[in-house]
Amino acid sequence: MTEKLAQQWPIPESVNEIENYMKQRVGLGISFDFGVRKLSILKRGVHIYYVNGLCDTMYIIQLMKELIGINNKEKASTDLFTIIENKLVNQSVERVKTLDKVVDQVLSGLIGIVIEGESTAFVIDVRSYPGRSPQEPDTEKVVRGSRDGFVENIIMNTALTRRRIRDERLRFEMLKVGKRSKSDVALGYLQDVADPDLLNIIRKELKAINIDGIPMADKTLEEFIVKQGWNPYPIVRYTERADVAAAHILEGHVVIYCDTSPSVIISPTTYFHHVQHAEEFREAPAMGTFVRWTRFLGVLASIFLLPFWLLMVLEPSLLPEKLEFIGPNEETNIPLIIQLFLADFGIEFLRIAAIHTPTPLSTAMGLVAAVLIGQIAIDVGLFVPEVILYVAVTGIGTFTTPSYELSIANKIARMILMLLVAFFHTPGFVIGTTFLLIYLVQMRALNTPYLWPFLPFEPKGFLQIIFRRAVPGSILRPSIVHPRNRYRQPPNQQ
């Protein structure tokens, strides 16, 4: 039987025929975790199909007690189908008429109940996915704020969002992606706020995905939706914080949840969405603005500090008299551009090594690398001290970038600028910076200008980027998401 015919095959009235289908197609009797419990109720066969590890055993036991009790309370002449439906003590019971849907639901962690002589089955949601409890994400920590974060369970992730937005217009639209994995993917949005055109684009792209499975979850979805190619700059934003996701949904964004992933995709986003952090909104506006400016300074340093310093060293005539001390005070046999790249790659080596090293050892390794390797490299003449200084400051600026993807993209841009400065000096720096700006301006993330509100310029949006406004003063939703309802607060509450 072909896959297409199997999807259209109705449920046979013979439970033995259904059992044979499960053996031949699903692996019943071969896969140890896929099982069936056979019951005889009012002299008719009732089979319960399940997957060990995805179901809550106590719920199944309670359901079986209710079903077996029918033998002691009902007569054989009663309507068994209706009696069983009324005995299923669960809040989520669905009637199913095709075998393929029964199999899909059972493999998703639900249980399927088929009855001899009936062409309709029941699927009951008793899922209990293995996983960890919500905890604060390591990469998005805040001094004050909630400590719960998303986990690998899509049901729990949507519940964490629902807890923060108790609006009847909040929607979680479920889709299945992957011919074999059939992974659960949900679109979270406010029905009366989110842009319908954006929703249609994302929904269309998700339904068009034709692949066996998405074991890499949200990252695979991103590559199909936005078709990023070799563009290093992130087009969508990831977050593991439930409060951040809820805040973006209230603004009119669409959030994509994927089962087995602790992060969600926020769309659409601009460059400035990637340099925001929850810490700014957990402090007073003045404090939040100061933190934001400091972060912006770190991001700029991570891109332009090393190329600009190299330019000043190669063309000291550009320096004012009071800044003539900038630059190496001693001769070296290794060109500065080589030293900068060696030191920059050295920090990258340490970052990658720290990811793959247990935390106590990674801390010790970082201290050894910073104190011993850096100092010895200076003593033997491999580096001049200024190289270590400016590369370290640039590295700190890279780590202040909240978005991991954006920090790596900025590092690639910095290296290209350094090469242009090394070969062409001032023209290289000017042309490289101009080209980077033009490249970012022409980018569009789901039909959204990447540098909005800087280019195209929108004064109100730009001021909100520069200054962290108080919540009572944020009357309007950002226009970049094209919200159907622009007002976050009624105008008379200004």
Image (cartoon, rainbow, N blue to C red):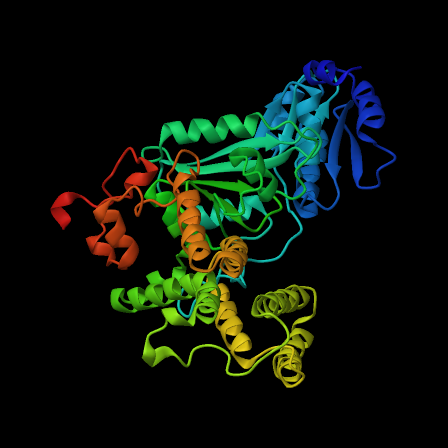
Q: Nearer the viewer, residue 213 or 65?
A: 213
With 43 as the anchor, is 202 left or right in this view?
Answer: left
Q: Is residue 69 visible?
A: no
Up-down: is 45 above or below 291?
Answer: above
Up-down: is 270 above or below 17?
Answer: below
With 460 as the anchor, is 272 left or right in this view?
Answer: right
Q: Please identify the quarter of the rendering in which residue 426 is found.
A: bottom left
Q: Please identify the quarter of the rendering in which residue 114 is found.
A: top right
For image coordinates 50% across by 64% down, the residue present is 398
Check the picture and name the quadrant holding the N terminus. Answer: top right
For image coordinates 79% across by 34% down, the residue present is 36
Up-down: is 366 above or below 129?
Answer: below
Residue 480, image x, y percentages: 32, 40
Q: Nearer the viewer, residue 34 or 88?
A: 34
With 223 as the anchor, is 112 left or right in this view?
Answer: right
Q: Nearer the viewer, residue 48 or 242?
A: 242
Q: Is residue 201 visible?
A: yes
Q: Give the farthest residue toward the front.
A: 317
Instruction: Count the labels in the image.
Output: 0
Residue 461, image x, y percentages: 26, 48
Residue 31, image x, y percentages: 84, 38
Residue 335, image x, y percentages: 60, 70
Q: Give the farthest residue toward the right.
A: 30
For image coordinates 49% across by 70% down, the residue present is 396
For image coordinates 57% across by 34% down, the residue present is 224
Up-down: is 225 above or below 452?
Answer: above
Q: Give the farthest residue toward the bottom.
A: 379
